[in-house]
C-alpha cells in the first residue's frame, strides 16, 4: 500500500467513524473519569473524524512536551493538550490534508475550553517515517504517542528510529496499535479496505518486538491488550483465521539490559501521581499499590527512577551486586486473550 491510498481512505472514503467496516480502529468505552472530563471539551467535529484503537493518555503529563504521530483530526492532541497544562505543548503530525484542516480550525476553541491564554498545540503535515523533514529537534520530546497509525506505515522500522531520535533521555514512546498473531500474507497488503481498517498492515507481535529493540528501545513493555473481533464476515473470510489484538506498549529511551536482571532493588509507589489513584500501572505485569515496597528488576527500576515517574516513587538499593536473572517480569506470549473487545466510543 502507498501513502496516497491511506490518505484517500482517511481523507475521502471515511467521512466519520460510522463508515468503518470493522471494530479494529475504535476505542473501548471504559474511559477513566478524569479523561472523560477532558474529552467532553473537545469539539464535536474533531471527535466525529476520530479513528483510533486505544487510549494514548499516559500518566504524569503536566508540563510535558508531546508529539502525536498520525494525529488525524486532532482528538488525541487536544485531549493531551488538556492534560499537559498551559506550560506543556503538543505537536500533531499527519499526512492527510482533510484531517489536518479539521484539527487546525479548532485550536482557538480548545485553548478557550481549557482556559489557556493561547493554544499549546500545533500541527505539521508530513510523514511519520520522515520526521527529519519537519524541523523537529533531536531529543526535544518527553513523550511520543500514536493511536492506531503505525500499522499504516509502509516503513515501520523508520518510524521507531525517528521516535527514538526525537525523545529526550528517559522519555517514552507510548502508543496503541493493532497486532497480528502471525505474519500477515503480503498479498493482503494490496487490499485497500483491509489496510485502511488497520488489519493487513498490522505487525506480527514478535516482529514488532525485534524491530523496537533494533531501533534502540530495549525491553518493550505491554501495558494492556484486547482481542479484536472483526464482526464482518466478508473481511473475516479474506483474513483466513488470523487473530488480531489491539495493544498499548510503552518503550523507554533508557540504557536498559536485554533481559530482566536482579540487583536486589525495590521501589514503593507514594500515591502522589495526579489522577493516579491507589495504584500505578507501569505495564501488564507491574501494578504498584500505594505504600507497598516491591522487588523489581534493574530495567523496571530504571524505567521509574530515570523517567518523569521518579518523583512519585521511593527507591531502595543500587546496582553494585548482581544476583542473576530476575523472576517475575512476565514472558511468553504477550497477549493472553483474557480481555474483551468492549464497546467503542
Image: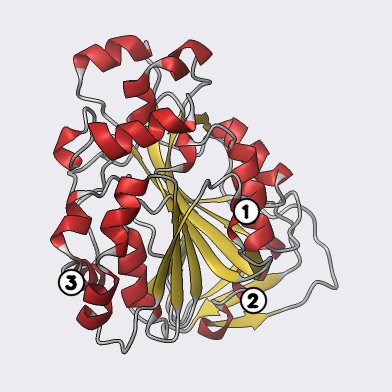
Disc 2: which residue: 305
Q: Earlier in the sequence, mark 3 or mark 1?
A: 3
Tell me, yes or no, if residue 278 can be seen here.
no
Q: Earlier in the sequence, mark 2 or mark 1?
A: 1
User: Does residue 105 appear left or right of residue 145 in this picture?
Assistant: left
Q: Label 3 crowding class (10 Å Cα cut-off): few <14, some 14-19, many 20+?
A: some
Q: CA distance from mark 3 to mark 2?
A: 34 Å
Picture layout, residue 224 above or below residue 195: below
Q: Label 1 crowding class (10 Å Cα cut-off): few <14, some 14-19, many 20+?
A: few
Disc 3: which residue: 41
Residue that lies at the very extreme toward the bottom in this rendered image: 117
Tell me, yes or no, if residue 225 can be seen here.
yes
Image spot of residue 294 (x, y percent): 56, 70
Which disc number belongs to residue 133?
1
SS under mark 2: helix
SS under mark 3: loop
Q: Residue at x 37, y 10 (%)?
A: 240
Is residue 15 or residue 42 the one in the foreground?
15
Report the mark closest to the observer, 3 or 2: 3
Image spot of residue 238 (x, y percent): 33, 11
Amino acid at each position: 500500500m502507498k501513502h496516497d491510498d491511506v490518505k484517500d481512505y482517511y481523507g475521502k472514503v471515511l467521512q466519520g467513524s460510522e463508515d468503518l467496516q470493522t471494530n479494529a480502529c475504535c476505542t473501548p468505552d471504559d474511559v477513566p473519569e478524569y479523561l472523560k472530563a477532558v474529552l467532553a471539551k473537545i469539539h464535536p467535529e474533531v471527535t466525529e473524524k476520530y479513528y483510533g484503537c486505544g487510549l494514548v493518555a499516559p500518566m504524569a503529563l503536566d508540563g510535558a512536551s508531546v508529539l502525536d504521530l498520525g494525529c488525524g483530526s486532532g482528538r488525541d492532541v487536544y485531549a493531551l493538550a488538556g492534560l499537559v497544562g498551559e506550560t506543556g505543548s503538543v505537536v500533531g503530525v499527519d499526512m492527510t490534508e482533510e484531517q489536518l484542516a479539521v484539527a487546525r480550525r479548532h485550536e482557538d476553541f480548545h485553548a478557550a475550553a481549557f482556559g489557556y491564554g493561547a493554544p499549546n498545540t500545533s500541527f505539521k503535515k508530513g510523514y511519520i517515517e520522515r520526521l527529519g523533514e519537519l524541523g523537529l529537534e533531536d531529543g526535544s520530546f518527553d513523550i511520543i504517542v500514536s493511536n492506531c497509525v503505525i500499522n499504516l506505515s509502509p516503513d515501520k522500522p523508520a518510524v521507531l528510529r525517528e521516535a527514538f531520535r526525537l525523545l529526550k533521555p528517559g522519555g517514552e514512546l507510548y502508543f496503541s496499535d493493532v497486532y497480528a498473531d502471525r505474519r500477515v500474507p503480503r498479498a493482503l497488503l494490496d487490499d485497500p479496505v483491509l489496510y485502511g481498517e488497520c488489519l493487513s498492515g498490522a505487525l506480527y507481535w514478535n516482529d514488532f518486538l525485534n524491530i523496537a529493540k533494533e531501533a534502540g528501545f530495549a525491553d518493550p513493555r505491554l501495558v494492556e491488550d484486547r482481542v479484536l473481533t472483526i464482526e464482518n464476515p466478508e473481511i473475516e473470510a479474506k483474513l483466513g483465521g488470523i487473530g488480531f489484538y489491539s495493544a498499548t506498549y510503552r518503550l523507554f529511551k533508557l540504557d536498559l539490559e536485554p533481559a530482566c536482571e536482579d540487583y536486589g532493588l525495590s521501589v514503593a509507589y507514594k500515591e502522589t501521581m495526579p489522577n493516579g489513584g491507589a495504584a500505578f500501572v507501569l505495564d501488564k505485569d507491574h501494578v504498584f499499590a500505594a505504600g507497598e515496597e516491591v522487588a523489581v528488576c534493574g530495567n523496571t527500576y530504571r524505567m521509574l527512577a530515570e523517567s518523569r515517574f521518579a518523583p512519585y516513587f521511593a527507591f531502595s538499593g543500587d546496582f553494585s551486586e548482581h544476583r542473576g536473572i530476575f523472576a517475575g517480569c512476565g514472558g511468553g506470549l504477550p497477549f493472553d486473550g483474557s480481555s474483551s473487545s468492549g464497546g467503542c466510543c
